[in-house]
Image: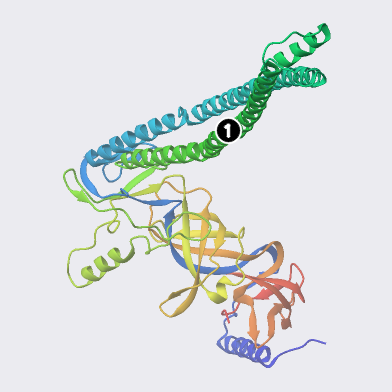
Amino acid sequence: MIFRSPRALGLLALVAAALVTSGCGGAEAPPPRTVAVSRAAVETGVSAQGSVAATATNNLGFPQGGQLTEVDVTVGDQVRAGQVLAKIDDFAARQQLDQAQTALEGQEAAYQQALDNTAVDGAGNSVASARRILRATQDQVDTTLEQDDAGIHQAEAAAAQAHRASDQADARFAQDQAACAANGGASSYGPPRMLLPSQQQTNTACILLPGDQSQAAMAQQGAAQADAQVAQARSKRQLDEAAGRVQVEQARNGVVQVQNQLDAARAARPSQLDQAQAQVDNARIGVENAERGLANTTLTAPVDGVVTALNGAVGEFTQPSSGTTPLAPGGEAAIPGAASGAAAGAGAAAASMGASPGRPGGTQFLLLQSTSGFSVVAPFQEMDAAPLQPGMPAHVTLDALPDVTLDGTVLAVAPASTDIANVINYYVTVAVARPDPRLKDGQTAQTSVITGQGTNAVSVPNSAVIRQGDRTSVVVVRPDGQQVPTPFVPGLVGADRTEVRSGLTEGQQVLLTARR
């Protein structure tokens, strides 16, 4: 059973009417235009218009403003990385470097002074001296006490001898006194008389008795004096011992004081050295900053590239560079129309009012574009950008070079949207595989990103496809000339062909109609 849609029946009616008309006129009708169902490459994708952008664009200038003393390039020059581009007056920078180096030398001298500081050694010497004084004081006190002990022993020996002499004198006195008393108390104090021999001996004792008494008294006095000397010697030892303890404690306190000074000097030395070293390091940083400031008076090329804008001549004053380049996603290429910033926008506004155009590169002193390659940066509407992924193939055509079609690859898709004329867009960067030497930054480019591809798919031309709602069909022309509307399941829909998933077979002839 062959399904014929109302549209197909209408087409058949038109064909039949044409045959009748031609028959009535007597002329044979021309054969219908057909094409075979065949295998071919089918590509589908999305397109957007963008601009060619150099792989990298650098807005260059001086970190600090100054008077230009040297400009070594012109617009269009090819430069190498590290090449000197321009210089500004470096007098102030050199002065700052000299001051920083002088400050560093001063801090290094201060550090050396702290390193050579003899406070610790001096305190150590003081401790050694105080300890020697303590030992000498202790030795002196010990010697004095030894001498005092010897004096005490000597006084005690003298006292003992004096007491023995006193005891002997007392004994003689007692003996003579007893002998004298035995004779009735005769003494030499009476008148002379004739005495018996026994009486003469007794009388002698009586005669010696006053002398014995005097000697006993003197001996007792000597013993008392000797006892006083012993007491004096003992008292002296006690005084010397007390004074010695004071002297030793004073000497010991002196040791403690200088030891504390030594400990304090030792504890303070590391921090003093650290502080001095920190000041040296800080001064060295100042020298490095001054050296960087001097180096920044010379502008060099960061990469190989071509000078595309130059705003300044020798003798003019430049302002500190503060401009940046809005980068396209996935690399260092600039977003078209955004690189010049507000100044370029103001220049464009002035140009629209009949004034002179804005300065190339805006307010930047110099623009350098990389010569390593080109990309195409294009804004895709959100529906078109949704399926795009890095790595997808793309085709690039240019208005300025209509004979050129370049192959490319999606490098990156912006993760954030950009509002362009109240329409949400996403910037997409397409890397051009083999740039044409005629490519220039800023050229208008049409970018087509291939989102689907069938390399050897059964397909039919789009001019043969009839689409009605969700139904897709063609008119198959049989060998006998009969035209049969035939539905099929489409796959990829490219710019000029539609993939056939099912419903048609390779080799069938289909009628070419107006594209629906």
Residue that carries the numbered disc 1 in the rendered image: 243
Q: Quadrant of residue 26?
A: bottom right
Front-most of residues 275 and 155: 155
Question: Where is residue 509 drawn, in percent x and y?
Answer: 70, 72
Question: Where is residue 331 drawn, in percent x and y?
Answer: 50, 55
Front-most of residues 495 and 244: 244
Residue at (37, 64) in percent of width and height: 337
Q: Quadrant of residue 234?
A: top right
Residue at (37, 38) in percent of width and height: 287
Front-most of residues 401 and 415: 415
Amino acid on which disc 1 is placed: Ala
Q: Quadrant where the C terminus lies?
A: bottom right
| Figure check: 506 above or below 130 | below
Residue 274 makes an appearance in the image: yes
Question: Where is residue 377 drawn, in percent x and y?
Answer: 47, 61
Residue 31 makes an appearance in the image: no
Residue at (52, 70) in percent of width and height: 416
Q: Quadrant of residue 290?
A: top left
Label 1 crowd bin: few (<14), some (14–19), many (20+), radius 10 Å: few
Relative to 111, 194 lies left or right:
right
Instruction: Give the SS element for disc 1.
Output: helix
